[in-house]
Amino acid sequence: MIVKKRHIRIDAENWIHDPEQAHVDVVVTFPDATRWISNFYTIPCIESMRKDYLTSGACLDGAYWCASTPVIIVDIINRERIEQVVDDKKEGFPYVFEYFGPVEVRDLESSDYPPGFFDNGSRMDPWYISWHAVRLKQMLDQADVDVRERLKEQLFGESS
């Protein structure tokens, strides 16, 4: 799935004061117009948040911490390190980044995609779609018949 051609958007990239104690959201876009997201944190940043939770009482007084999307813990947060992680072929990109949806018109207006970046007619990697379809089937096997029927109707416009 990973090709060299990719666009990386690092939220708040210009606001990082201490790259060894920071966190950022990273969105990677590929020429097939798919977007992927992950949160990058440093351990000192997580420790700092835990100390804040101890004072505020959040997360059982700092007993735990969680993020809403996949998390990648790095030693330093800067563009070079993030690009190294994105391009690391030893780890599975789909396991450390979450599908974030297709590029939409508003994304084209607010991002700095280079001219000719997107490939017309290219499609998402079939392996990734199959992987998620299997996971969805496993969940549906545990769902009520009503839920399965409603989803079948919504997804395929058919009912039993």
Image (cartoon, grey):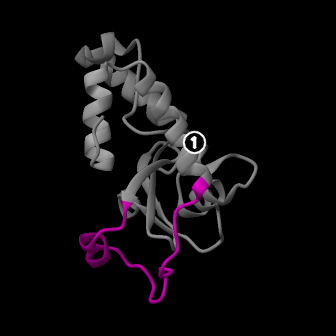
Please give the residue where the numbered disc 1 appears in the rendered image. Answer: 131
Magenta span: 102-126
**6 horizontally vs 47: left or right:** right
- Where on the picture, by quarter, is residue 53? top left
Q: Is residue 100 left or right of residue 81?
A: left
- Disc 1 residue type? Trp
Q: Residue at x 27, y 18 (%)?
A: 58
Q: Indicate whether 117 appears above or below 122.
A: below
Point out the image quarter for the C terminus: top left
> What x and y, as percent, mark residue 76?
57, 48
Q: Give me the residue at 66% from left, 59% from top.
A: 84
- What is the number of callouts on the image? 1
Residue 95 screen position, x and y as percent: 59, 42
Q: Residue 42, can we see it? A: no
Q: Residue at 45%, 84% (x, y): give it.
A: 114
Q: Is residue 72 magenta?
A: no
Does residue 49 appear to the left or right of 159 in the view shown?
A: right
Query: Badge 1 local density, few (<14 within 10 Å), some, or many (20+)?
Result: few
Return the x and y of residue 138 as percentages of the image width and height: 50, 26
